Image (cartoon, rainbow, N blue to C red):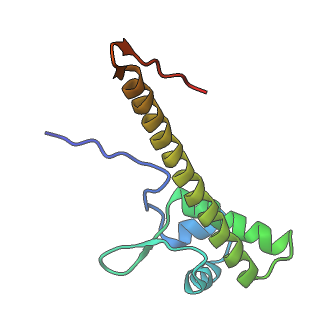
Amino acid sequence: MHEMFQLTDDTPVYVISVAAQLSGLHPQTLRQYYRLGLVSPDRTPGGGRRYSARDIVLLREVQRLSQHENINLAGIKRILELEDQVHELRRRAEALEAELAHTLAATAAMLGSLTYPGRQIEGQAR
């Protein structure tokens, strides 16, 4: 049976020369960004770099911050780290909100089923 290959924004498909062309940067600049930890392309078993569409967008953002905002590479690295932290915190906040909603619904259901000597106690949401 033939399995469909699904291409996503995170699929590493571009060799360094294509990634450089798509991002408008020189391949040596991509290597420097890799050494500095600004971008982390996947590696093939032979050690070649493979960039995803998301990596290309990131490379363009690094270039924009560097050339148009005059931010040095250390500053850009810190900005990217902070953006990753914000993304992770938002993801965690959403998970906690969903967990809280589930807990509140379960608590309300449990309160609705409580009885007190001869009568039912009604749970009220506030």
Task: Write down the quadrant of residue 43 in the picture.
Answer: bottom left
Q: Quadrant of the N terminus?
A: top left
Q: Residue furthest front?
A: 117
Q: Could you tell me if residue 24 is visible in this image? A: no
In this rendering, is residue 91 above or below 65? above
The percent coordinates of residue 79 (x first, y second) are: 71, 71
Task: Write down the quadrant of residue 3 in the picture.
Answer: top left
The percent coordinates of residue 45 (x first, y second) are: 29, 76
In the visual, does 116 lie left or right of 100? left
Residue at 40 percent of width and 78 percent of height = 48
The percent coordinates of residue 125 (x first, y second) are: 56, 25
Count of labels shown?
0
Residue at 43 percent of width and 57 percent of height = 11
Task: Write down the quadrant of residue 103 in the picture.
Answer: top left
Residue at 48 percent of width and 22 percent of height = 123
Judging depth in this view, the residue of 122 and 49 nearest the camera is 122
In this rendering, is residue 114 above or below 29? above
Q: Residue furthest left?
A: 1
Q: Could you tell me if residue 5 is visible in this image? A: yes
Judging depth in this view, the residue of 120 and 90 nearest the camera is 120
Q: Quadrant of the C terminus?
A: top right
Judging depth in this view, the residue of 93 and 61 nearest the camera is 93
The percent coordinates of residue 40 (x first, y second) are: 51, 74
Residue at 71 percent of width and 64 percent of height = 61
Q: Residue furthest top?
A: 119
